[in-house]
Image (tube, grey):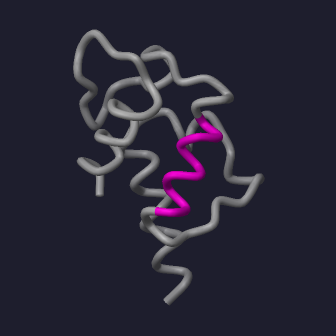
Amino acid sequence: MENKLLGILGDEILDLEEPLTHESDLFEAGLDSMGIMQLILAIEDQFQVVIDPSELSRDNFATVSHIAKLIHSKQSTAR
């Protein structure tokens, strides 16, 4: 899941000079409000979860690892 998120961010959302890691600060890498919206659409499509507006926090989207944790919790709740 984290590798898929890295691919989405690197290929579709961020214009990166250096590759991201699972712990890279996404906001330092250039993630902005428009990028978050693109990312949410991709997450909901790829992982079949719905991100609630209350979950749109800087902490939840700070790193790929944090995003993966959010997705895992959403998938666990859906089961």
Q: Judge whether 77 appears above or below 40 on screen.
A: below
Q: Quadrant of the N terminus?
A: bottom left
Q: Residue furthest bottom?
A: 79
Magenta span contains residue 41: yes
Which one is nearer the viewer's eye here, 56 or 8?
8
Q: Residue furthest top?
A: 17
Which one is nearer the viewer's eye here, 72 or 20?
20
Which quadrant of the structure image shows residue 68? bottom left
Q: Residue furthest front?
A: 12
Residue at 58%, 49% (x, y): give it.
40
Q: Which residues are magenta?
A: 36-45
In x, y percent, where is residue 66? 44, 46
Q: Judge whether 65 appears above or below 19 on screen.
A: below
Identify the main secondary structure in magenta: helix
In x, y percent, where is residue 57? 66, 40
Magenta span contains residue 44: yes
Residue at 53%, 24% (x, y): give it.
31
Taking 10 as reference, is 57 left or right? Answer: right
Q: Residue furthest right?
A: 53
Which one is nearer the viewer's eye here, 36 or 70?
36
Residue at 23%, 22% (x, y): give it.
19
Q: Judge whether 35 appears above or below 72 on screen.
A: above
In x, y percent, where is residue 35? 58, 31
In x, y percent, where is residue 45? 51, 63
Residue at 60%, 36% (x, y): give it.
36
